[in-house]
Amino acid sequence: MISRAATPTVSVEVESMNRTGNLSLGTGNGASGNAFVRFGGQALERGKASPGGTYADWFFSGSGLESIEWTQLPVHDPDISLTNDGLLHYYAYTFSVTNSTNNVGYGYAGFQTNGYINGYQRGRVINFSFWGSNGGKTSGPGMINANNNESGGYQIMYPFNWTVGHQYAFQLKPGPSGTDAQGKWWGLWVKNLNTDVTTFIGEERVQATIGGLNSTLIKPHTGNFGEDLHWWRSLSGQVKYLCSDFQNSSMATLNVTANNGSLRPSSFNAFTNSGAASVHPDNGYATTNCNVSTYTDTNKNVQMNLGHWAAQAPNQLPN
């Protein structure tokens, strides 16, 4: 999975249009201006196309957070052919504990259209993992991978059959197991705001000090990404795609807060990597990322639209 991203510098064809909400194609805070991608897709020949990705950042005041909250709203699910192809879309909220490193303390959680664990496809899941976590617990149908190849720590895959149009409030905060000699447990809960049902996804333990420094709070910079796993095959040229081959989906992230809802972000931005080059590090195979989009509004909400949209993706932001 993509874990971190830098803001790209790319050139993408856009058109002005009067609409509610904004769309970001590159660097920007989404605070003003209206635009939309020319959704027909780039005229890339077969084999030169790779899937675009979407990103957002929220910044809070202070030096550390006790909890973070966000709501995910599924707008449009990808066609079942994506799962049948053994691929997936992942819409993840990202976070890090204070004084985290590249190997310990970074994490993500969110809706994944097809969960892989222990070599098997598991369908719709919530994927939750901390880099370098040294413990993990879940309940009910939840599954644990104690040695995730990407994070080098524990991974929880929790089967979760979400409903398009429902809102799901996530909260990451200190877990039921508290703190012990090996670190602090961070728990994840998800509440369906349409049915008022709350599900405990699980908890993971991260060491309480990293490099001799305290790591018991969440950094005040959090993020969000949308990832299309076609890149597993496009990057090396294993499968040669057109932009129109990529199934579409949309997910909104709403109501981002911290400290049990008492703190709102001071700033926000959203962007994509549309038009950027992807080059395989070993064989040098080169492709160009196809057009994807983000919509934003004045309340620092974002909707991410992956894949190929023959027409404009529906905008479901609340304002």
Image (cartoon, rainbow, N blue to C red):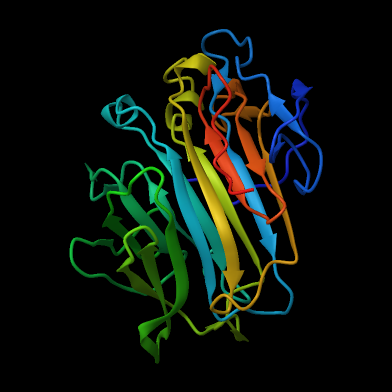
Say which of 182 and 64 sits in front: 64
What residue sits 46% from the left and 23% below the top? 246
Give the number of callouts.
Answer: 0
Residue at 60% of width from left, 16% of height from top? 41
**On screen, residue 225 above or below 230:** below
Residue at (38%, 65%) from the top-left corner? Answer: 190
Q: Is residue 132 above or below residue 268?
A: below
Give left or right: position of 203 versus 228. left
* Residue 60 higher or lower than 40, as above or below: below
Residue 152 appearing in the image: no
**Quadrant in the rendering for residue 188:** bottom left
Residue 213 can be seen, yes or no: yes
Rendering coords of residue 45 (x, y %): 57, 7
Q: Residue 292 location in percent, x, y?
A: 60, 30
In the rendered image of this protein, does residue 26 appear above or below residue 183? Answer: above
Residue 289 in picture, x, y percent from top left: 61, 26
| Towards the viewer: 261 or 113 | 261
Q: Position of residue 184 (x, y in %)?
A: 44, 84
Residue drawn where x is 64% and y is 50% of the image? 56
**Seen in the image, is 8 located left or right of residue 282?**
right
Between residue 297 and residue 113, name the one nearer to us: 297
Q: Is residue 55 left or right of residue 228?
A: right
Answer with the quarter of the image where residue 23 lies: top right
Left or right: 75 in relation to 199? right
Residue 300, located in which quarter of the rendered image? bottom right
